[in-house]
Image (spheres, rainbow, N blue to C red):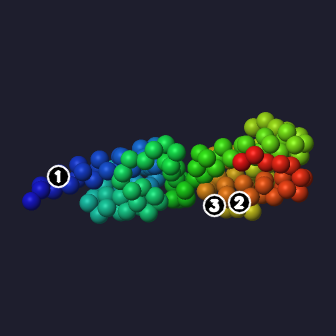
């Protein structure tokens, strides 16, 4: 039988691997450790065995599987556990925006114009009703709606899209 401290080290290693695989920033990670695991300090070292199990279960619930993920499929999550838009989704939104600008439907082709439009177009999907400030901050399901919105806008304007 393994000593208890071996399980602790193993759990802590898994927690830190999950943090890296899920691309969690320090603030989000500490918020998860506090809220899910119950460690007031926000440090995984202060987690009880039950807290470690809860944090690992939370990471699995939001998409971490314990195996190495390549960068294309790496999932980013918020403190609330929402899975953010994937890199291919963000690239698709930018590509559609540029094609819309080339077709004459969009006047401001740059990143500032895209961010302003995303904020306006996503107000109804944001909890506070203010919209998301950039494509990379969209939850995955909202990013898909934004992509479909841009595609239908292009169809209405009769702009040929290259996907």
Closer to the camera, 12 or 114? 114
Measured as percent of width and height from the top left, residue 11 is found at: 27, 53
Q: Which residue is mark 2?
A: 145
Picture quadrant where residue 142 is located: bottom right
Q: Which mark is in front, 1 or 2?
A: 2
Q: Is residue 31 left or right of residue 156?
A: left
Report crowding for label 1: few under 14, some 14 to 19, many 20 or more residues within 10 A (C-alpha).
Answer: few
Residue at image location 86% in from the left, 49% down from the top: 159
Q: Which mark is residue 141?
A: 3
- Residue 51, visible in the rendered structure: no
Q: Are marks 1 and 3 in contact (CB under 8 Å)?
A: no
Q: Is residue 97 left or right of residue 36?
A: right
Q: Are marks 3 and 2 in contact (CB under 8 Å)?
A: yes
Residue at image location 85% in from the left, 56% down from the top: 155
Q: Which mark is residue 5?
A: 1
Q: How many marks?
A: 3
Measured as percent of width and height from the top left, residue 52 is found at: 31, 58
Closer to the camera, 88 or 3? 88
Residue at image location 75% in from the left, 62% down from the top: 124
Report crowding for label 3: few under 14, some 14 to 19, many 20 or more residues within 10 A (C-alpha).
Answer: few
- C-alpha gap between disc 1 and disc 3: 41 Å
- C-alpha gap between disc 3 and disc 2: 7 Å
For marks 1 and 3, the one nearer the N-term is 1
For marks 1 and 2, the one nearer the N-term is 1
- C-alpha gap between disc 1 and disc 2: 47 Å
């Amino acid at each position: 039988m393994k000593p208890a401290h071996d399980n602790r080290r193993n759990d802590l290693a898994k927690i830190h691997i999950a943090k890296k695989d899920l691309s969690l920033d320090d603030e989000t990670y500490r918020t998860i450790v506090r809220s899910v695991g119950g460690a007031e300090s926000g440090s995984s070292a202060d987690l009880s065995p039950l807290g470690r199990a809860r944090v690992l279960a939370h990471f699995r619930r939001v998409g971490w599987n314990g195996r190495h993920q390549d960068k294309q499929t790496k999932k980013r999550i918020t403190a609330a556990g929402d899975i953010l838009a994937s890199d291919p989704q963000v690239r698709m939104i930018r590509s559609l925006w540029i094609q819309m600008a080339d077709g004459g439907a969009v006047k401001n082709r740059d990143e500032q114009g895209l961010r302003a439009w995303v904020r306006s177009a996503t107000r109804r999907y944001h909890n506070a009703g203010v919209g998301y400030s950039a494509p990379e901050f969209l939850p995955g399901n909202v990013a898909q709606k934004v992509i479909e919105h841009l595609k239908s806008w292009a169809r209405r304007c009769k702009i040929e899209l290259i996907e």
